Image (cartoon, coloured by chain):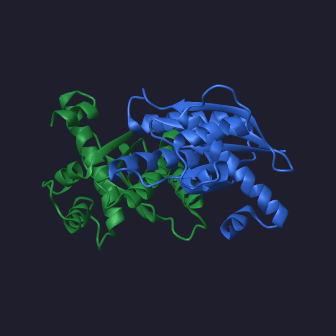
Chain colours: A blue, B green
Amino acid sequence: MTRILGIDPGSQRTGIGIIDVDGAGRVSHVHHAPLVLLGAEDFPQRLRVLLDGLTAVIATWQPDEVAIEKVFMARNPDSALKLGQARGAAISAVVLRDLPVHEYAAKEVKLAVVGRGSAEKTQIQHMVGIMLNLHGKLQADAADALAVAITHAHVRATAKRLGVSSQLAWSRK
Amino acid sequence: MTRILGIDPGSQRTGIGIIDVDGAGRVSHVHHAPLVLLGAEDFPQRLRVLLDGLTAVIATWQPDEVAIEKVFMARNPDSALKLGQARGAAISAVVLRDLPVHEYAAKEVKLAVVGRGSAEKTQIQHMVGIMLNLHGKLQADAADALAVAITHAHVRATAKRLGVSSQLAWSRK
C-alpha cells in the first residue's frame, strides 16, 4: 500500500487530499481538508500558515509520495505570482521532508480522472467522488487535490505494469 | 548593531546580500553571493537548492532581520509563476527560522538607494558599491539584494528616530 498526498496550491486556500493505492492500482480515500490561508496578517505569514499546515499534514498522515498540480496559465502576472509563492511554499514543505514530488498538468489530471483533457471542474468533483466512494459534494480544492493524487496513483500503476519509473511511463503516453 | 539579510529572489539565481547597520543608521558590507539554482534536475529540486542554500546562509551569518524585494510586474504569467515559486521558497526558509520579513517594492528600493524611484539597474549597482565601499563591479542580483537590505536599514533608522515601528514609518512616507 502506498499513501499519496495530493496538493492543489492556492494563495487563499490550498487543497489537501490523501489516498492509498494498493498493488493493483486500486485507490481509497484517506483524508481531505483545505488549508485556509486568509486571515494571516501579511503574505509571508500566510505562506507560513501553508508551510506549517502542510508540515503537520505530512507528520500526521505520513504520505510516501506527493503529487501536485502544475499550474495552468494564471489570469494575469499578479495572480500567477501569488499562486507561484503558495506553490513554492508547498513544495518547500514537501522537499524539506525528503518526499518525492510529482507534477502533473491540469490536462493530465482531467484525462486521468474524467477521461477527457478538456473536462469541467464539476466533472472532476463528480468523478473523484465516485472513484473514492465519497458521499456529498466535494469542494473544488479538495476534489482537485484528490484528483492529482489519483492521477499519480494511475501513473504509478501503469509504470509498474510496464516495469519503468513513473515519470517515464507518463511521458510515453 | 543589527544584521540585515537582503534577498533578491529569482528562479535561476537568487541574490543574497548581508549588511550591518549601527544605531546611527550607518551601513557596512558583510557578505554577498548568488545562490545558483540552475543545474538542479527538476523545479522542486531547484527550490530545494534555494531553501537549503538560504537556510545555510542564515545559519552562517545569523541575520536579525530580513528584507526582500516585492516583485515588480513580471513579463508574463509564466515567468511570474516561476519567480513566485522562488520567492515562496525563499520566504519559507526565512519564516521557518522565525525571522521577521520586510517587503519593499522596487520603487521604494530605488528611492532609498539612488534617490529616484525610476532609477536604472546600473545606477543601483553603482550606488550600492559606493554606499558599502565596495571595489569592482557588483553583479545585478548581488546589488539588488544589498540594495533591499540598505533600504530596510534606512527605514529602520527613520522609524527609530520617529519612535515608531519600521512598517509604520515607511507607510507614512
Q: Is residue B24 visible?
A: no
The picture quadrant where one finds residue A101 is: bottom right
The x, y position of residue A162, in whole percent, is 82, 66
Q: Up-down: is B80 above or below A125?
A: below
The picture quadrant where one finds residue B172 is: top left
Q: Up-down: is A127 above or below B15?
A: above
The picture quadrant where one finds residue A31 is: top right
The C terminus of chain A lies in quadrant: bottom right
Q: Is residue B57 visible?
A: yes
Number of disc labels: 0
Relative to A169, B80 lies left or right = left
Please report the residue visible at 54 percent of the width from the left and 50 percent of the height from the top.
B55
The x, y position of residue B52, in whole percent, is 57, 54
Q: Residue furthest left?
A: B116
Relative to B87, A161 lies left or right = right
Task: Depth check: give the residue in front, A18 or B98.
Answer: A18
Please report the residue visible at 32 percent of the width from the left and 67 percent of the height from the top.
B140
The N terminus of chain A lies in quadrant: top right
Task: Depth check: give the residue in front, B114 or A83.
Answer: A83
The x, y position of residue A58, in whole percent, is 68, 38
Task: Depth check: give the residue in front, A107 or A114.
Answer: A114
Q: Residue furthest bottom?
A: B136
The x, y position of residue B56, in whole percent, is 55, 54
Please report the residue visible at 33 percent of the width from the left and 48 percent of the height from the top.
A78
